[in-house]
Amino acid sequence: MTGQEPPLGKHGDNGPTPPDSGAGMTAVTYLIAGMLVWGGIGWLVDHYVGTKGVFAGIGAVLGIGLGVYLIVRRLGA
Amino acid sequence: MVIAQSAVLAAEFPPSVEDFYLPSILPWGAENNYWFTKITVLVWVAVAAIIVYFLASYRKPQLVPTKKQWLAESIYGFVRNNIAVDMIGPRGVAFAPYLTTLFMFILVNNFFGIVPFVQISPNSHIAFPAILAVISYVMFIYVGVRHHGFVKYFKHALIPPAPWFILPLLIPIEFFSNFLVRPFSLAVRLFANMFAGHMLLLVFTLGGFAMISANVALAPVSVLSWVLTIALTFLEFLVICLQAYVFTVLTASYVQGALADEH
């Protein structure tokens, strides 16, 4: 098999991104990362302000929304 | 004797993290000394086996390959064509040697998890997956910086195409998912799969001994438990191959992301 040439020209040098280059994993990571980052920041705000989880909740929802937005911008057509 | 032995084994039930810390070999039997254990031996055996095998098979390459050469070429060809080139594109050929080494190292080390009488994988200690993840992490950042230049690479990796007012909200997420989660998830995925696999086999094997020594009437259940151990060993084989593949594919995917041109 090494004797064969690798399948060149399949994507071309400046062709489009190869199909399925871990896009699924990236999407899941963005969702979870969004929730964790802004949920975490919200939790810290809660901690210092003295509220009992309002900001963590808002942060988590906001984070999920931002995660979806990031997926659309980065991975969408 | 069988009863005594099973009583000894049953005393170790349920298995714990302690079961992953095997006795020291050098110095022999030293307490709390983990510098040279079975794990160390296995890693060296894996490295030696891979080096010797590939050197031996490529020593006198034939036009019509021997069986040994054919297998070695198939492994390299698989990683090069189906992982490196498929994920990264034509530039991926340059990464095929590293990816093949990575794939083989993880595969052989994982495989120790189900070899009879060896039955523990070095990758069930997080140190080994962690170092592999760090190597891949440093590599994809280095490759990206070399390809784009320092500022442009981080700009590309951290700043998504979005209006300026939303960027402060998005950049922390990008940083977190691209530079913190990636090495962590690579290491933990491999480690946890190998750890859980070893634990699972321990539970079913030792559980059988625990039941039979608690009450001889439970002997049929013990036998069932051991039969399931064998079945789970085959499941482990699947996990072993899959995790080696996933680790390699994700490394290739990160390299692809680092090399990607802006669009």
Image (tube, coloured by chain):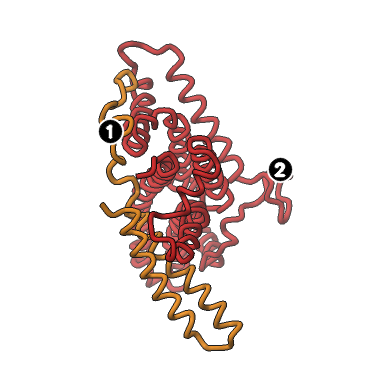
As shown in the figure, which amino acid type bears the numbered disc 2? Answer: Leu
Disc 1, SS: loop
Mark 2 closeness class: few <14, some 14–19, many ≥20 residues within 10 Å = few
Asked if residue B2 lies left or right of residue A28, the reply is: right
Which label was assigned to residue A11?
A: 1
Q: How many marks?
A: 2
Q: Nearer the viewer, residue B57 or B145?
A: B145
**Residue A64 sits above or below residue B186 on the image:** below
Which residue is farthest front?
B164
Residue B176's spot in the image, x, y percent?
A: 50, 60
Asked if residue B98 lies left or right of residue B79, the reply is: right
Mark 1 closeness class: few <14, some 14–19, many ≥20 residues within 10 Å = some
For residue A33, say whether it is visible.
no
Residue B148's spot in the image, x, y percent?
A: 48, 38
Q: Nearer the viewer, residue A68 or B11?
A: A68
The residue to which callout 2 is attached is: B26
Q: Which hue is chain A drawn in?
A: orange
Q: Chain of mark 1?
A: A
Residue plotted at (48% across, 79% down): A56
